[in-house]
Structure formats: C-alpha cells, structure tokens
Image (spheres, rainbow, N blue to C red):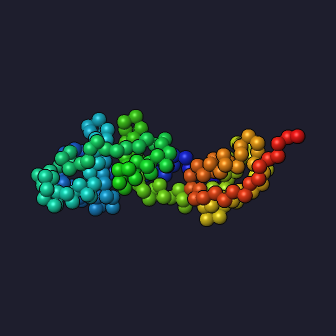
Amino acid sequence: MKRVRSVADVMTHAVITVDGDTPFRRIAETMEQWHVSALPVLSEEGRVVGVVSEADLLLKAEGGDEARAVRARELMTRPAVTVASGASIAEAARLMARGHLKRLPVVDDGRLVGMVSRGDLLKVWLRPEEDLAAEVRLVLVSADALDVRAGVVDGTVVLSGTAPPAYPADVLVRLIRAVPGVVDVDSRLTAARPDA
C-alpha cells in the first residue's frame, strides 16, 4: 500500500527550468518541446526566483507593457508561489486555488525539488480502493476503534460498528475524512455504552 500524505508523494521530480537570461523564443520552444505550460526561473544559485507561464508569454503578444520583455527575468511572475515537499495535498490545493495557479514549484531549503500540478493533486482521488481501505484501517487501529468496520465504494468510506469511548463517531469521521483520497464518509456508527 502506498500512503499518500504530502506533495512529495504526487509531485513530478524531473523539472525543466530556465534561467533569467533565457530569451522569449527559447522559452516558448521549451514549453512546446516538453508539453508544459510554465517553467520555473532559477537564479545562478539554483533558487526559484519566478515562474514564466504561457499566460506571461501571451501578455507580451497582446502588446501591453510587457511588449519590450524579451528574457525570462522580464516576463516571469515573481515572487514565485512555492510549496514545500512536506506540505499536505490540501495545503497545495489551497495555494493553487488562492492564486488561480495551475502548478507550483516544490522547494526544500530554497532548492527546487519538483513541480506539482492540479492534475497531480487530483490523482489522490484515483488511488486504488484497496490502498484507501488499508490506510483507513490503520487510522482505526491507531484510534483503538477495533469494533469499527470500514468499506470503500467509489472513494466513499462506509463506517459501521461501535465507536470507542475515546473517539466518538464525529471524531472518527473527521480522522477518516483527512485521509487523502477519501471523497466522503458514510457513518453508521453507534456510540459505545458507558461502563456501568
């Protein structure tokens, strides 16, 4: 079972980059060659200083203030919005949604280690149901919910049985919803009877 916990689990490790001196045409050719719509721009030290995207290139084509921009450093969007490889899938999704971004450079200790796209994040919901069920069982075991049964159908986890006193049904549901790839939780749990 492959556990999916962070951006590192879904990101692309091989990333095509450009430097600040890369000319417009070379940027466009690189995007075409590698079938990507954005490229991180790296400093001489290898740090991400910006991102140049198809949208940035198209602004130049419109003839606005960017019409004189001919190199990556003039075309790029800066500062680059980045995410750490250890960030959660949800955190990366929030950053993308807030910035209306399609992809994020993944950076650790200031160095580029990968790229994550919306498509990469969506793959979480395509995990095999056996993997999802196994990870849900691990959560239940760690919560000492040994009387709880879990099944997965189309990404929805169906919980039945008796919730342990230390983890009421609503808490178990929240824990299960946090498992990457869980679409919904159908709780049919009953509360444990207090000891007499």
Q: Give how far across and how far down residue 81 sits, in percent.
A: 34, 44
Q: Residue at the right extreme?
A: 196
Q: Give how far across and how far down residue 90 sits, in percent.
A: 49, 49
Which of the image's four quarters has the C terminus?
top right
**In terms of image quadrants, where is residue 119?**
bottom left
Q: Residue at the bottom extreme?
A: 154
Q: Residue at x 21, y 60 (%)?
A: 58
Relative depth, front residue between 188 and 125: 188
Q: Give how far across and how far down residue 138 sits, in percent.
A: 68, 47
Residue 193 in view: yes
Relative depth, front residue between 78 and 112: 78
**In terms of image quadrants, where is residue 189?**
bottom right
Relative depth, front residue between 25 and 98: 98
Q: Residue at the left extreme?
A: 68
Disc tally is 0
Q: Residue at x 46, y 46 (%)?
A: 91
Residue 8 in view: no
Q: Residue at x 56, y 50 (%)?
A: 4
Q: Residue at x 31, y 44 (%)?
A: 80
Q: Give how far across and how far down residue 146 sits, in percent.
A: 78, 47
**Is 38 on the left or on the right of 121, as rendered?**
left
